[in-house]
């Protein structure tokens, strides 16, 4: 991580890895963001999971091992597991996240579910999948990647990510994936620049983390949160913009940085995809699309992909609206 931070801050367009936003405080602030009226994606995610979870589970017969990538504090995992335990006596659940605080919160949120064994893995998503315990004999894996997590990947990275997930699965295993779909910028931007300023605090917290962990001396008051829409890349960009010229040291990385007034650190991207893109990438990765459900009030998709025996492209099956 330190090398990514070093190279990013030394670049012409200064950047930070988006995963660095999610320390203990950052994870809590993101949980607060999901409750904001502007962040409609969270409510669309909840609606779709509530409406179609049983349909998805009915397509996956037999007992399941459930793995969630980026579970937050476990609210969606609890919804899924509450249904899974109705059909099997014992359930293995594995939570994978880069934030230890989120994993602790997830474990606490699920600890009262009878028959559920919770394991947590602190690490990147693919690293966590590869380190996850093997499913019990006769169990399929169901990987959950919900919310707007996929939006953090650009298109090339999203395709590679789906292939990496498929490499950890056996034929017949499932991937329950949700994603925010393309929509006008005026609908999206308020979700990343809310009136209460929670997203701004989430973004600026990364400077406090640099100060605390790497001996930097950022004056957080000098930097302002900025959300931008890039039409060509179909993404929201989050930046921290210097309101005046300043010099910053990052002692642990031996960096001496200068910021001109108006210069930014690019901290996160949030891409928007089309359903046809998602289906095509999944097919190339070795999945068939069992079903896709689309929320039309806030264009958002919940899709169940099944790992195929043959990684060659597959024909999509059903789409429900």
Image (cartoon, rainbow, N blue to C red):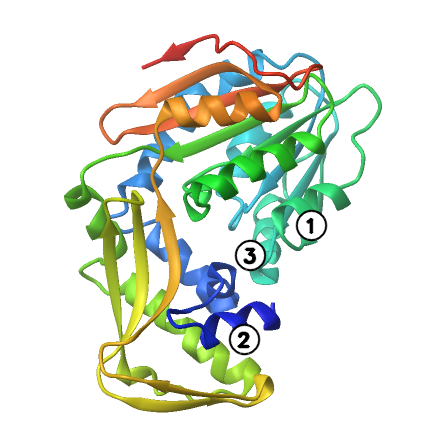
Q: Which mark is residue 259?
A: none
Q: Is residue 71 left or right of residue 184?
A: right
Rounded to the nearest whole Å, what is the CA distance between mark 1 and mark 3?
10 Å
Q: Residue at x 79, y 40 (%)?
A: 133
Residue at the spot of label 2: 6
| Proximity of marks 1 and 3: CB atoms separated by less than 8 Å | no
Residue at the spot of label 1: 120
* Among numbered discs 3 and 2, the one appearing first in the sequence: 2
Q: Residue at x 60, y 44 (%)?
A: 110
Rounded to the nearest whole Å, what is the CA distance between mark 3 and mark 2?
25 Å
Residue at the spot of label 3: 102
Foreground mark, 1 or 2? 2
Q: Is residue 182 left or right of residue 115?
A: left
Residue 134 vs residue 256, the one in the foreground:
256
Q: Quadrant of the N terminus?
A: bottom right
Image coords of residue 34 (percent x, y): 35, 49
Q: Residue at x 43, y 19 (%)?
A: 52
* Among numbered discs 1 and 3, the one appearing first in the sequence: 3
Image coords of residue 137 (percent x, y): 84, 23
Number of labels in the image equals: 3
Up/down of 299 relative to 38, above or below:
above
């Amino acid at each position: 991580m330190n090398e990514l931070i070093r190279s990013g801050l030394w670049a012409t367009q200064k950047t930070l890895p988006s995963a660095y936003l999610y320390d203990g405080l950052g994870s809590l602030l993101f949980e607060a963001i999901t409750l904001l009226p502007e962040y409609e994606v969270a409510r669309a995610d909840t609606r779709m999971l509530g409406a179609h979870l049983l349909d998805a589970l009915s397509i996956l017969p037999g007992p399941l091992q459930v793995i969630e990538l980026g579970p937050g504090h476990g609210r969606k995992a609890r919804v899924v597991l509450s249904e899974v335990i109705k059909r099997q006596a014992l359930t293995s659940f594995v939570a994978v996240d880069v934030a230890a605080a989120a994993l602790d919160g997830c474990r606490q949120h699920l600890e009262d579910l009878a028959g559920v064994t919770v394991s947590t893995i602190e690490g990147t998503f693919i690293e966590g999948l590869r380190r996850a315990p093997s499913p019990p004999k006769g169990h399929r894996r169901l990987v959950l990647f919900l919310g707007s997590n996929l939006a953090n990947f650009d298109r090339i990275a999203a395709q590679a990510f789906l292939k990496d997930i498929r490499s950890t699965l056996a034929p017949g295993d499932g991937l329950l994936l949700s994603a925010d779909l393309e929509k006008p910028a005026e609908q999206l931007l308020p979700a990343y620049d809310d009136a209460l300023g929670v997203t701004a605090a989430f973004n600026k917290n990364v400077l406090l983390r640099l100060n605390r962990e790497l001996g930097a001396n950022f004056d957080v008051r000098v930097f302002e949160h900025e959300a931008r829409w890039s039409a060509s890349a179909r993404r929201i960009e989050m930046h921290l913009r210097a309101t005046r010229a300043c010099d910053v040291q990052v002692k642990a990385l031996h960096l001496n940085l200068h910021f001109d007034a108006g210069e930014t650190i690019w901290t996160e991207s949030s891409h928007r995809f089309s359903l046809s893109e998602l289906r095509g990438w999944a097919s190339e990765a070795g999945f068939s699309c069992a079903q896709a459900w689309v929320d039309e009030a806030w264009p958002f998709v919940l899709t169940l992909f099944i790992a195929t025996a043959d990684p060659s492209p597959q024909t999509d099956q059903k789409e429900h609206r």
